[in-house]
Image (cartoon, helix red, strand yellow):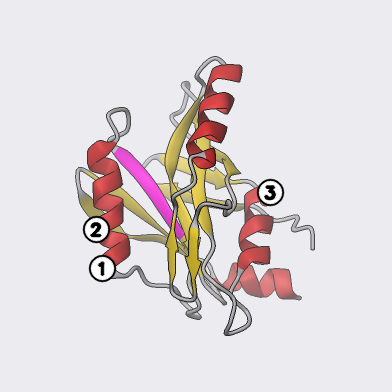
Amino acid sequence: MNILHEIVFHDEKRVIKITNTIVDLLWNKRQLIYSYPESGGILIGRENITNNNLIIEFATSPMPEDIQKRSRFIRKDSGHLEFYQNLYNENNGIYRYVGEWHTHSERIPEYSMIDKKNWKKILKNDKCNTIQYHLIAGLEAVRIWKIKSGSIIKPQLICTQFWRNIIK
């Protein structure tokens, strides 16, 4: 199914857009059947230097070396970072790592303690970004958490209506 919707939300004075290509990926990776494993990858975007808005336009999909279980996704494959590095190099450094995405089998996803620990570790090891956005796609909603200075900010978006509009 090709999704023609994008997600747009506000974070303080910044507009953040997630392109329909990524929304399509999230939609297709939902854990609709009990045996489906979690999926995940990284989010890559670019900032508009004139207004500080962020467009998240690339995401990686699960790769062969990743670990996918019913309630766990571990990004192990170096292909995720290779994809990012190639994109960065081919586009004169305009793209940046934005955060991680993965699925949950919950209707309205909530991060787990494992997610929280992982997000904080990723931010601590990221020498370039002081703010990251991590996304979890559930069965009926997508939620996005902002990580800033090691703190997890309440979700910026719960878009149950968004999924319902796609289903119609």
The residue that label 2 is drawn on is: 117
Dominant secondary structure of the residues highlighted in magenta in the image: strand
The residue that label 1 is drawn on is: 113
Is residue 22 located in the magenta-colored stretch of the structure? no
**Residue 160 vertical placement versus 54 (above, below):** below
Q: Residue furthest top?
A: 92
The quarter of the picture where the N terminus appears is: bottom right
Residue placed at 50% from the left, 44% from the top? Answer: 43
Q: Residues within 10 Å of mark 2 (few under 14, many from 20)?
A: few
Amino acid under label 3?
Thr
Amino acid under label 2?
Lys
Coordinates of residue 27 in the picture (x, y in percent)? 65, 65
Coordinates of residue 38 in the picture (x, y in percent)? 51, 68
Earlier residue among tags 3 and 2: 3
**Residue 106 vertical placement versus 41 (above, below):** below
Name which quarter of the figure residue 35 lies in.
Answer: bottom right
Report the span colored magenta.
131-135
- State the SS at label 1: helix
Mark toward the viewer: 3 or 2? 2
- Disc sitting over residue 21 in the figure: 3
Coordinates of residue 24 in the picture (x, y in percent)? 69, 57
Compute the Cα span from label 1 to label 2. Answer: 6 Å
Q: Residue furthest bottom?
A: 34
Name which quarter of the figure residue 99 lies in.
Answer: top left
**Residue 123 vertical placement versus 111 (above, below):** above
